[in-house]
Image: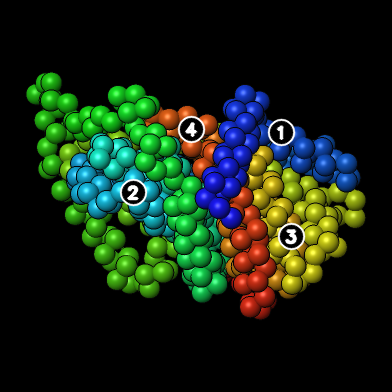
Amino acid sequence: MSAESTAATEGVLARVALRCAAWAERWFPDAYVFAVLGVVIVALAALAFGATPKAAATAFGEGFWSLIPFTMQMAFVVIGGYAVATAPVVSRFIDLLAHVPNGGRGAVVYVGLVSMLASLLSWGFSLVFGGLLVRALARREELRMDYRAAGAAAYLGLGAVWAMGLSSSAAQLQANPASMPPGLVEITGVLPFTETIFLWQSIALTAILIAVSLLVAWLTAPGGRAARTARDFGEAATKAEAPALPPRARPGEWLEYSPLLTVLLSLLAFGWLFGEFAGKPVVAAIANLNTYNFLFLSLGLLLHWRPRSFLDAVAKAVPGTTGVLIQFPLYGGIAALLTKAAGHGGETLAHRLSEVFVRVADTDSFALVMGAYSAILGFFVPSGGGKWLIEAPYVMQAANELHAHLGWAVQVYNAAEALPNLVNPFWMLPLLGVLGLKARDIVGFTFVQLVVHVPLVLGLLWLLGMTLDYVPPVLPAGG
């Protein structure tokens, strides 16, 4: 294919993506509306299959508060990631990183690599860190870096591989029985990281996705005069970040501006963390979601050094948690409706849905069928952990019946769930806020990534799944 025809094809895909994004921004309701619709649809389905109104209401009410620990844990993933990414020392580190690339297209690929590697530690950290790196690179006018393509590359962490890393809400949930709704733990048991994100198949899939994503970023990044730099999007895009702290205004604020409290609190926090990691294998320690969040919060506090700087960062991060706080209780209610509201013959809706999967798939094709289904559902339920709570009861029951590897089923979900993120404006908001862009500015580039990723991800999920054998669920002690 000639360079001219390749450019024409990319232009068509970008125009289609822009139209899709414009339609979504105009017609898609808030994610909360999708969560409420999910409750209504699942409740009506339970009633249709014989559950009584009392049973449905009881299940919803009992499930509503069942995810409070997990809800707060997911909120702290956002807060901890944002606190670390905006610390003054990290900002200086970002400025150093911005001196590495030598050209505009190379800078776009560089941003994509940094974003995806950071997302394997924390998706919240990745979005903010990637956005700040793009802004720092944009101040290097000699690069002629396309600001839109760089913004799309900064989004690749969340759009491609975040769910394959440590902040995967599905993998974290399955490794922490105390965070799981009872109906789910009875189906799946406990799945440690060694059975999910640390499988060699999972690591291989992640490496391939990173390599292919970077190749697409290189091929689609405009260069030379075709590049639209940050200056094309206003002065705000090229300005350096404001100082982290305003001057102290009154004597009563001296402790907020002094590192004394930070030092004392950090001694306690890192003392506990040292004991935790010294007494357990690293994989077991970091798989505990409370330990994971505690590490990021403690690191964020220490890096900000002064309490006022840390509190300002937390205040800026909190708005990004509103969707989690208000939606996850609804997802808890949905999970309970699926697993607890019994209908005709004492069968729950989760059991009936699992029978559908068993009829349309076999052991070999289960990963392909589940991956396609999870990706499609992700366009309508933009929540990694919340959507897993909806899907898990019946897809994992089907995995048991088909004798498919349960840990790989989690990874099938993780890889497929990320696909709709590539064009879903909901998840772009924190990054767009940092960059001063709109979803339509970057979705043309992420749509090309989606076109490439869909067949690649589904094919690899099927192929790698063939190498794994079924392991029965392991219930927690006393379960």
The residue under label 4 is 441
Q: Is residue 303 visible?
A: no
The three-letter code of the residue at mark 4 reads Asp
The three-letter code of the residue at mark 1 reads Leu
| Residue at the farthest top position | 249
The residue under label 2 is 107
Measuring from the top left, give residue 110's x and y in whole percent.
35, 53
The residue under label 1 is 37
Measuring from the top left, give residue 377's x and y in whole percent.
69, 46
Q: Secondary structure at mark 4?
A: helix
* Distance in Å between CA atoms under marks 4 and 3: 33 Å
* Distance in Å between CA atoms under marks 2 and 4: 18 Å
Mark in the foreground, 1 or 3: 3
The disc at residue 369 is 3
The three-letter code of the residue at mark 3 reads Val
Among numbered discs 4 and 3, the one appearing first in the sequence: 3
Measuring from the top left, give residue 18's x and y in whole percent.
58, 33
Mark in the foreground, 4 or 3: 4
